[in-house]
């Protein structure tokens, strides 16, 4: 499909070119308007990648996940973090696919940047409800990212230099009209610029496309990304000791996809083979003590999917998927007087097989009614138990007229693994645990209803969706659980239930000189655990009552464009300290001041409010070289975005006080992008 | 238009990168709640300390630096403590000083449950909790071995407990004279560190072989230290309390874990009422053998 996004990115063009591009843009936008009202899809992001990539982000590094966090129903975690909390679900309940294969850690730099280099991203589909039955394995959302295919006819190159990272992309035909290749590389230079922070990340995307014949294509893709933090010879003046540490996190992904389209366009088939892996290794030594921690998760998967179009009024999809999971969490070795007491752990190697078969049918009953129904039967074979779950999905659309429609949907999703995190902070080292005989798979049931309206003359799409979702077998650590160096995770995990509901309002404008969106979310996310918070319900850490986001992008002139983002959200809940007491330590080896806390998440941080702005100048040198200069300002008002509460000493009052801190203030960044 | 753009660029350059001021937040404080701690050095003696919680905005270090203020403000001055057992037997504990109640003519029976009731007449608060008295463990041997490596001195302590049953729990605590001397100095701040590794080790009877529990622990000490080691059998509730208490000393849990109150066996109160007598060993580093 011709992407309007790709074209609107082009800069200096002739008047004729611009006219054509405007027509294409309007055409693509009209198609989006039609899809918005006429399909049965609900809870689906309808915003093109080109718009997502233009939203202002920290350090000027464009990021599609952070942009999606500005859409209704998708909450942010800690400021700047790429973790998503969709419709009250946890950050592990999002299925993130890159060219059809799952990724287990989608963040760089403790999650401040996503793995997705926007230079290589072709399309992003985000589902929050009404999930097609071809998707499964997570409870709350699906984010399907497709990478670009290399050009079969022309050689192209692009480069981007921003304040914290640079990237380059090359593409072109290896065999003209038969075999193409595209490769992107991105690296930060934080370690080069700031010598005190010996950290960097890089990622590589490469994809080959072979046109076997007009009906058959073969795609081979690879992604590799690593985060590396190396500290060495750092003196600790107090103890005169030397600290050495090495932290290494990384993803690897290989995909091979065969695509077949019947010559009469009556059916299409995709077969995907993939291997995906995430692992981390943290080692350190100081004062005769040493620690080495490793964890990994890897999948070998195969997926086949066929879409059949030859029955009038029906679009049928059938398929199957099988994944062999290998979990190898918490391999720990320690030595030295201080660390030996944590013990060593060989880890618990777990292998299991997850499978699913599914069928989906989109049936146009008449002009007004469209029914999309599906059934996915998923299962997991563990050493001790076989799980089997039917996952019914149904969505219906009633078209009142060409501009108005009402949609309803129900979807059950099942998740056979959990990533349990400490509720205060999520870390890339948070472990994925499989369902076992004792740890049950998570199940979600979501009902949603929505009203959709389009204003074609103004290229505006409006929607209002109400959802209600129940979650069962969601996992949390026991109170006081040991989060790291834990060799028996099943002992420290407890299961509970969740209930989330809310309303989402969204207005988008995807064509014209002014584009952007305005979104509002009212939401509730509660958790129910018998063994936590004395059995009383509590709000999830990411529960935020109100959330308003505005993104505006304006083409001021042929060369200049500007953008702004305005975000307001209610503060997230936290557990506050409301007192303290002094008691003698066991064995009378001293005294301890012990805190007294509120019940879990009983208090709330102050609201966040932030305005970002950006300015872009597009230029061309000759006919070949095009580019743009960007200046972006994150948090232009320099307001604290509260993310945690500190207890600090107040010199004036001679007592402690509580204050909220954020991670970032105003950050001004620049970038230059070149396309040849 | 160009002028506006130039002005916008200049403005953004001026604001560049800044860090915003933190925002204050009010955290409502709870009222006074009774806090209990106890010690029973032998089967005849029980000492109870009963105080109050106080606002988290107050500096605990300054309170403990001023013992008079601590006793005056944060210990129960008008109240009583009673130990009850069987159905109707009650023994009032003697009021020793403000907040401290004791009795040294008890005949505590190992394995028997006792209930402590503390009444605060001034604030009209009553709290109570139960504990099982645990006699000292049977200690077959304790063998300390010293290892010296440059300025570092390590001591390995091998010990064996006898008559250990699978459902039993044990703890070892230790205090070093150097650490105690440091804490007893001009400031007591070192004594009130929540985040330091807790000097308590826990064991369960399921690790015993032929009813014998053999362990070796390693302590980092100073060459001139005296180390007091205490080994005790404890009940299940106190074991869970100590398990949670130890985790408060894990820095990683402080940073990433969910803040939770320590468990307490006192109804509507904090602290822990425990009754266990321990074996105590004093180790003088000057006399401990050096490993060959």
Image (cartoon, coloured by chain):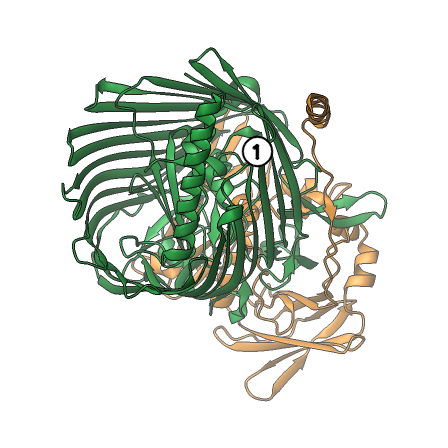
Chain colours: A green, B orange
Where A424 falls versus A385 (above or below)?
Answer: above
In the foreground, A203 or B122: A203
Left/right placement of residue A9 relative to residue A437 reads right
Residue B36 appears in the picture as rendered: yes
Tally of numbered tags: 1
Q: Is residue A247 visible?
A: no
Pick out the residue farthest to the right. Answer: A652
Q: Which residue lies furthest to the bottom in this view?
A: B88
- Which residue occupies 34% across, 34% down? A147
Badge 1: chain ID:
A
Q: Residues within 10 Å of mark 1 (few under 14, many from 20)?
A: many
Quarter of the image with the C terminus of chain A is: top left
Residue at mark 1: A58
Q: Is mark 1 on a helix, strand or loop?
A: helix
Which residue is located at x 49 percent, y 73 percent?
A: B110
In this rendering, is residue B193 above or below A290?
below
- Quarter assignment of residue A300: top left
Image quadrant in which you'd find residue B55: bottom right
- Residue closer to the observer: B36 or B88: B36
In percent of width and height, residue A183 lies at 33, 23
Residue A322's spot in the image, x, y percent? Answer: 20, 50
Q: Is residue A538 left or right of residue A151?
A: right
Residue ID at (21%, 60%): A384
> On the rendered image, what quadrant is the N terminus of chain A found in?
top left
Left or right: residue A317 versus residue B184 is left
Q: Could you say which quadrant of the image residue A252 lies in?
A: top left
Residue A458 higher or lower than A471, as above or below: above
């Amino acid at each position: 499909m011709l992407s309007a996004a790709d074209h609107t990115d082009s800069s200096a063009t002739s008047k004729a070119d611009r006219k054509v591009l405007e027509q294409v843009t309007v055409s693509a936008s009209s198609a989006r308007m039609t899809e918005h009202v006429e399909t049965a899809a609900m809870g689906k992001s309808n915003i093109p990648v080109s718009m997502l990539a233009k939203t202002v982000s920290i350090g000027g590094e464009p990021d599609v996940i952070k942009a999606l966090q500005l859409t209704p129903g998708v909450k942010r975690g800690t400021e700047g973090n790429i973790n998503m909390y969709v419709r009250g679900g946890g950050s592990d309940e999002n299925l993130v696919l890159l060219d059809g294969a799952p990724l287990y850690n989608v963040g760089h730099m403790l999650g401040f940047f996503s793995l997705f280099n926007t230079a290589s991203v072709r399309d992003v589909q985000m589902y929050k409800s009404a999930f097609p039955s071809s998707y499964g394995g997570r409870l709350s959302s699906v984010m399907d990212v497709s990478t670009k295919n290399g050009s079969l006819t022309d050689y192209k190159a692009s480069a981007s230099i921003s304040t914290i990272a640079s990237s380059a992309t090359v593409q072109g035909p290896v065999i003209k009209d038969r075999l193409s290749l595209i490769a992107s590389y991105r690296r930060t230079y934080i370690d080069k610029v700031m010598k005190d922070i010996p950290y960097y990340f890089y990622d590589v995307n490469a994809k080959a496309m072979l046109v076997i014949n007009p009906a058959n294509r073969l795609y081979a893709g690879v992604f590799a990304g690593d985060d590396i933090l190396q500290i060495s010879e750092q003196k600790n003046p107090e103890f005169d000791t030397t600290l050495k540490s090495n932290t290494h996190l990384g993803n690897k992904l290989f995909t091979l996809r065969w695509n077949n389209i019947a010559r009469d366009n009556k059916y299409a088939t995709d077969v995907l083979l993939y291997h995906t892996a995430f692992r981390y290794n943290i080692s350190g030594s100081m004062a005769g003590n040493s620690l080495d921690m490793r964890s990994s998760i890897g999948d070998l998967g195969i997926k086949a999917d066929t879409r059949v179009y030859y029955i009038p009024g029906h679009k049928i999809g059938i398929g199957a998927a099988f994944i062999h999971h290998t979990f190898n969490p918490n391999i720990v070795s320690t030595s030295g007087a201080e660390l030996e007491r944590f013990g060593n752990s060989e880890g618990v190697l777990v292998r299991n097989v997850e499978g699913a078969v599914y069928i989906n049918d989109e049936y146009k009953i008449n002009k007004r009614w469209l029914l999309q129904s599906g059934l996915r039967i998923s299962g997991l074979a563990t050493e001790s138990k076989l799980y089997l779950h039917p996952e019914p999905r149904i969505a219906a659309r009633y078209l009142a007229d060409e501009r108005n429609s009402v949609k309803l949907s129900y979807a059950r999703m099942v998740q056979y693994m959990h990533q349990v995190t400490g509720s205060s902070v999520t870390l890339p080292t948070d472990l994925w645990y499989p369902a076992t005989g004792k740890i049950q798979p998570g199940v979600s049931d979501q009902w949603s209803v929505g009203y959709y309206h389009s204003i074609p003359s103004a290229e505006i799409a409006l929607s209002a969706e109400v959802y209600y979702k129940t979650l069962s077998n969601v996992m949390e650590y026991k109170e006081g659980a040991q989060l790291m160096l834990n060799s028996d995770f099943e002992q420290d995990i407890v299961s509970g239930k969740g209930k989330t509901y809310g309303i989402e309002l969204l207005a988008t404008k995807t064509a014209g000189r002014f584009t952007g969106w305005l979104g509002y979310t009212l939401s509730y996310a509660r958790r129910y655990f018998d063994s936590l918070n004395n059995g009383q319900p509590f709000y999830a850490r990411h529960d935020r009552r109100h959330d308003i986001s505005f993104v505006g992008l304006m083409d001021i002139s042929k060369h200049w464009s500007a953008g702004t983002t305005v975000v307001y959200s209610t503060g997230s809940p936290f557990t506050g300290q409301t007192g303290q007491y002094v008691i003698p330590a066991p064995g009378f080896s001293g005294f301890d001041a012990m805190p007294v806390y509120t019940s879990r998440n009983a208090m709330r941080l102050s609201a966040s409010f932030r305005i970002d702005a950006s300015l872009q100048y597009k230029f061309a040198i000759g006919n070949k070289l095009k580019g743009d200069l960007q200046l972006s300002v994150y948090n232009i008002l320099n307001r604290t975005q509260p993310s945690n509460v500190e207890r600090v000493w107040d010199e004036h009052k001679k007592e402690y006080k509580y204050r909220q801190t954020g991670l970032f203030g105003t950050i001004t960044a620049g970038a230059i992008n070149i396309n040849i | 238009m160009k002028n506006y753009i130039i002005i916008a660029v200049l403005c953004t350059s001026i604001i560049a990168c800044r860090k915003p001021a933190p925002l204050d937040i009010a955290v409502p404080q709870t009222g006074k709640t009774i806090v209990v701690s106890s010690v029973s050095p032998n089967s005849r003696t029980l000492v109870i300390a009963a105080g109050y919680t106080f606002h988290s905005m107050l500096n605990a270090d300054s309170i403990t630096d001023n013992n008079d203020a601590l006793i005056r403000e944060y210990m129960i001055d008008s109240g009583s403590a009673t130990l009850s057992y069987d159905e109707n037997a009650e023994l009032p504990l003697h009021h020793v000083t403000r907040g401290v109640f004791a009795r040294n003519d008890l005949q505590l029976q190992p394995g028997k449950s006792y209930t402590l009731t503390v009444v605060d007449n001034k604030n009209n608060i009553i709290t109570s909790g139960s504990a099982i008295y645990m006699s000292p463990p049977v200690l077959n041997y304790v063998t300390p071995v010293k290892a010296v490596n440059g300025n570092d001195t390590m001591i390995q302590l091998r010990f064996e407990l006898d008559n250990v049953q699978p459902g039993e729990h044990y703890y070892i605590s230790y205090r070093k004279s150097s650490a105690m001397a440091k804490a007893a100095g001009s400031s007591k701040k070192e004594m009130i560190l929540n985040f330091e590794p807790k000097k308590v080790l826990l064991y369960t009877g399921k690790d015993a072989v032929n009813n014998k529990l053999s362990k070796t622990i390693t302590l980092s000490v100073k060459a001139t230290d005296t180390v007091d080691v205490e080994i005790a059998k404890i009940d299940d509730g106190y074991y869970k309390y100590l398990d949670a208490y130890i985790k408060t000393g894990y820095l990683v849990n402080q940073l990433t874990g969910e803040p939770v109150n320590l468990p307490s066996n006192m109804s509507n109160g904090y602290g822990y009422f425990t009754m266990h007598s321990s074996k105590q060993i004093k180790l003088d580093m000057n006399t401990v053998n050096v490993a060959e």
